[in-house]
């Protein structure tokens, strides 16, 4: 056998061994499915129905370890309320109710905001100041819902809300902001569930939108639909409507005439003032 034939035979043997080994492996071992690593083992459902367990947050169906420090439902509910007040979007995303048991929903929120809550919990969990209660009860009247100046309401709600409310009564403000929402000082009623001081606003519809003062009888100014107003500087309530001060314009606008959605600016002429114009259809 010549040299070239020997080389060809060696190569052929290597090929046969390689192919045979591959098919032998395929026959002896079941290949791993592509999606095996994607199989999820889901925990049993944990409905946020207020039926959570005791100190450790367990439900009695097995050992469950939570990292939050709450030992009573009352402590957990204060944290729930704080999350719903300060981070309402997140609370909705994880279905965290304002009240309920010590369960996995509280645990999830605690892992995200527990560190922040720990820094201010001594304020949030403090007792309502009696002087603040007296200030509110000496000024406020019953609003559209429950009497928020009652002892029952004031002593059960967030102390920081009560303190802010009382301070704005002393400042003679007609409205105040708390937890990124706006409330009426006279009643404690919620006026806006968003904060105009942190939100860019636009004109909702063309017309006599701006006012020289926060009331129905003040001079009005025309601005077109889509006109960018920027962020507010303050707000006021005249007993019927909530007004937002626009620093760029140095004028006021009713909250019902603004939108937080950017619109196409029409480019209409900005006709000037109509003194005493009151037909706002607000």
Image: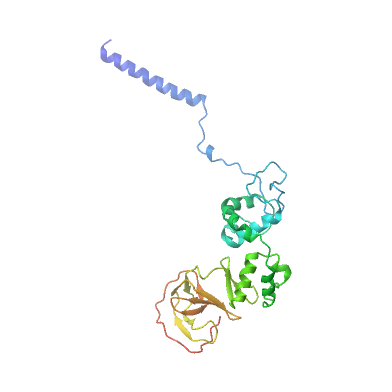
The quarter of the image holding the N terminus is: top left
Q: Position of residue 171 (x, y in %)?
A: 59, 76
**Position of 95 compared to 229: left or right?**
right
**Image height check: is 155 above or below 97?**
below
On the rendered structure, is 171 left or right of 136?
Answer: left
* Res 93 → quadrant: bottom right
Q: Residue at x 51, y 83 (%)?
A: 213
Location of residue 184 (image quadrant): bottom right
Q: Looking at this view, is 34 or 266 the one in front?
A: 266
Residue 44 makes an appearance in the image: yes
> In this figure, which colouring scheme has been used for the structure?
rainbow
Q: Quadrant of the C terminus?
A: bottom right
- How far across and how far down the image is residue 157, in percent? 67, 65
The residue depicted at 44 percent of the width and 22 percent of the height is 21
Identify the residue shown where x is 66% and y is 61%.
Answer: 126
Extreme top residue here? Answer: 1
Image quadrant where residue 189 sits: bottom right
Residue 244: x %, y % from top left? 52, 76
């Amino acid at each position: 056998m010549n040299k070239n034939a020997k080389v060809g035979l060696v190569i052929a043997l290597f090929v046969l061994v390689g192919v045979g080994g591959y098919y032998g492996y395929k026959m002896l071992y079941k290949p791993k499915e592509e999606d095996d690593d994607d199989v999820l083992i889901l925990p049993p459902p944990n409905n946020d129905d207020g039926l959570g367990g005791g100190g450790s947050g367990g439900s009695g169906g097995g050992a469950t370890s939570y990292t939050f420090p709450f030992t009573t439902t009352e402590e957990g509910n204060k944290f729930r309320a704080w999350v719903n007040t300060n981070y309402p979007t997140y609370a909705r995303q994880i279905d965290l109710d304002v009240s309920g048991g010590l369960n996995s929903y509280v645990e999830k929120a605690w892992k995200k905001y527990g560190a922040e809550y720990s820094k201010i919990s001594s304020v949030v969990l403090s007792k309502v100041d009696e002087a603040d209660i007296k200030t509110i009860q000496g000024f406020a009247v019953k609003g559209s819902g429950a009497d928020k100046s009652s002892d029952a309401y004031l002593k059960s709600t967030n102390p920081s809300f009560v303190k802010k409310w009382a301070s704005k009564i002393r400042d003679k403000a007609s409205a105040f902001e708390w937890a990124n929402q706006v409330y009426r000082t006279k009643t404690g009623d919620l006026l806006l569930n968003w904060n105009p001081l942190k939100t860019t606003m636009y004109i909702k519809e063309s017309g006599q939108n701006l006012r020289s003062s926060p009331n129905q009888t003040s001079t009005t100014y025309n601005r077109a639909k889509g006109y960018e107003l920027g962020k507010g500087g303050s707000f006021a309530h005249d007993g019927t409507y909530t007004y937002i001060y626009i620093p760029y314009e140095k004028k006021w606008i009713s909250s019902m005439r603004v939108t937080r959605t950017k619109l196409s600016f029409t480019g209409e002429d900005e006709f000037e003032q109509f003194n005493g114009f009151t037909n706002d259809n607000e």
